[in-house]
Amino acid sequence: MVQKKQNWAKSLTMAVNLATSVFAVIGIGLFGGKWLDAKFDTGSLLTIIGFGLGAATAGKMLWQHLMKQDQKESSLDRENKDKDNNSN
């Protein structure tokens, strides 16, 4: 397998961006649910639903990011394989 050089600053930026987005959607769901519970006096039902929706959205975001990374790696592997085949 060919070792790929990665720009650590770019990787760190992507990780911070993804983590911030995940915490934001979970926080919005959680605090939005708390606010709705206080407004409609529903106990903690809407807080749980808000947290669940936020967590589901965060999971979807993570899945999409992983699939995009996998597609990039597969296309790079194909390009490297084609280069190796053409050089022989």
Image: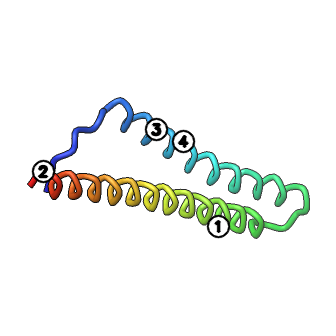
Q: For the residues labelled 4 and 2, say whether their Cβ atoms are less than 8 Å apart.
A: no
Residue 20, disc: 4
Q: Which residue is mark 1?
A: 52
Which badge, 3 or 1, comes first in the chain's sequence?
A: 3
Residue 82, given in percent of the width and then of the height, sits at 23, 57
Give the mark, 4 or 1, whose residue is nearer the N terminus.
4
Q: Looking at the image, is mark 4 or mark 2 nearer the viewer?
A: 2
State how far apart marks 4 and 1 are (Cα): 18 Å
Q: Nearer the viewer, mark 3 or mark 1?
A: 3
| Residue 69 locus on image (x, y percent) | 40, 54
Query: Looking at the picture, how far across and down is residue 64, in whole percent?
Result: 52, 60
**Crowding at mark 4 (Cα within 10 Å: few <14, some 14-19, many 20+):** few
Residue that numbered label 2 is attached to? 87
| Residues at marks 3 and 1, CA–CA distance in whole angstroms | 22 Å
Rounded to the nearest whole Å, what is the CA distance between mark 4 and mark 2?
44 Å
Camera-side residue: 60 or 38?
60
Which residue is drawn at the image coordinates 16% and 58% (left, top)? 85
Q: Given the image, on which type of amino acid does mark 1 rest?
A: Gly
Mark 3 lies on a secondary structure that is helix
Of the 4 image quadrants, the one containing the N terminus is bottom left
In the rendered image, the residue lying farthest to the left is: 88
Q: Which residue is mark 3?
A: 16
Q: Earlier in the sequence, mark 2 or mark 3?
A: 3
Q: Earlier in the sequence, mark 4 or mark 2?
A: 4
Tag 3: amino acid: Val
Callouts 3 and 4 close, C-beta under 8 Å? yes
- Residue 19 lies left or right of residue 34; in this view the side is left
The structure residue drawn at horizontal position 57% and vertical position 45%, both measured from the top left corner, is: 21
Please identify, in this view, whether the residue under mark 2 or under mark 3 is nearer the observer: 2
